[in-house]
Image: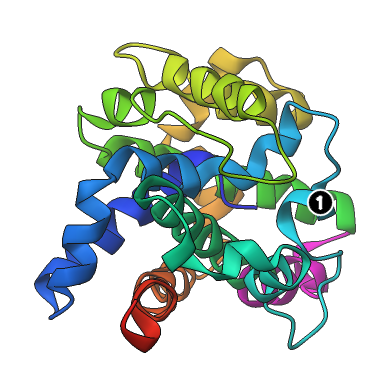
């Protein structure tokens, strides 16, 4: 699944593209509660540090139903989250970003994970495909992290949840926020590299070096996957998210 830094990178692009393509009201609304939007963009992954099961925070099972929209399931289970006009500004923007996270995850599952890995028998047995998947995620994570502005760490650190989720306590969101801001600090090591290095049977240092080795990357990733095609698919999350968030925040004159 997309990593937290990939989600933050999408958040940055959503605001930038909204401002550049005729969605000035949306860009202004997001900017006014930018820290809340940042936290909402990564909030569904609180299951990684809590006892909340993944379906409880992501609102779909694996595999997801073909036509299921996770954000609609969120609204169905918690109707108060489908009423942005009844929320404070910070919560409204946070929930909008939460929904965009769910949308991006399902783009990854349906258009990347399934066709390029789950059904891609030419890449080898399932274990080998999982390893390539881990390398791809770590590579994309490193690209996303490099694109984040220096202000990312303070933007996320300033998010102050206030009973924004009826199914998760504020202290869980704060713990998750702190874990991510620690990684965003200048010079901080990437836990993504550490996590996937272990699954690949490498040390963190070995995997970090391999990611910068053109020969290794060509053999283990670039020679196996159509990277330009994959990245083009992922970029569709930006206009889709803008449309989703615009409808959510402003439909019926919200």
Question: Would you say 203 lies left or right of 243 here?
Answer: right
Question: Would you say 17 lies left or right of 193 here?
Answer: left
Which residue occupies the foreground of this view, 25 or 181? Answer: 25
Residue 79 x, y percent position in the rendering: 68, 68
The C terminus - image quarter: bottom left
Q: Is residue 23 above or below residue 61?
A: below
Quarter of the image holding residue 52? top right
Res. 244 in view: yes
Q: Is residue 54 magenta?
A: no
Q: Residue furthest front?
A: 86
Quarter of the image holding residue 246? bottom left
Residue 92 x, y percent position in the rendering: 43, 56
Q: Is residue 203 above or below residue 93?
A: above
The type of colouring in the image is rainbow
Which residue occupies the foreground of this view, 231 or 131? Answer: 231
Point out the stretch of residues depicted in magenta: 110-125
Q: Is residue 160 above or below residue 117?
A: above
Q: Is residue 153 above or below residue 127?
A: above
Residue 162 x, y percent position in the rendering: 51, 34
Q: At 21% across and 48% down in the image, what residue appears?
A: 32
Q: Tell me the chief SS of the magenta region.
A: helix
Res. 140 in view: no
Q: At 42% across and 21% down in the image, what residue appears?
A: 181
For label 1, the residue is 56
Quarter of the image holding residue 231? bottom left
Please tell me how crowded label 1 is: few (under 14), some (14-19), or many (20+) other residues with Cα within 10 Å.
Answer: some
Q: At 63% across and 69% down in the image, what residue appears?
A: 71
Which residue occupies the foreground of this view, 225 or 173? Answer: 173
Q: Is residue 124 magenta?
A: yes
């Amino acid at each position: 699944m997309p990593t937290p830094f990939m989600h933050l990178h999408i958040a940055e692009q959503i605001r930038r593209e909204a401002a550049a393509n005729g969605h000035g009201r949306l860009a202004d609304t997001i900017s006014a509660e930018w820290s809340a939007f940042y936290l909402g963009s990564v909030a569904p992954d609180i299951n990684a540090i809590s006892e909340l099961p993944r379906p409880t925070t992501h609102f779909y099972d694996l595999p997801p139903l073909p036509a299921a929209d996770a954000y609609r399931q969120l609204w169905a289970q918690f109707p108060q989250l489908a009423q942005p006009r009844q929320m404070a500004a910070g919560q409204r923007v946070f929930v909008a970003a939460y929904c965009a996270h769910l949308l991006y995850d399902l783009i990854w599952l349906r258009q990347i994970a399934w066709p390029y890995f789950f059904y891609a028998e030419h890449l080898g047995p399932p274990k080998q495909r999982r390893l390539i998947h881990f390398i791809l995620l770590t590579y994309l994570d490193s690209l996303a992290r490099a694109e984040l502005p220096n202000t990312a760490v303070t933007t996320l650190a300033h998010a102050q949840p206030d009973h924004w989720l009826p199914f998760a306590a504020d202290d869980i969101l704060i713990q998750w926020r702190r874990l991510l801001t620690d990684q965003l600090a200048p010079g901080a090591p990437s836990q993504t590299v550490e996590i996937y290095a272990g699954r690949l049977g490498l040390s963190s240092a070995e995997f970090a070096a391999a990611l910068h080795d053109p020969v290794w990357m060509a053999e283990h990733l670039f020679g196996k996957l159509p990277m330009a095609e994959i990245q083009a698919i992922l970029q569709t999350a930006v206009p889709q998210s803008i449309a989703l968030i615009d409808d959510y925040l402003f439909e019926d004159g919200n």
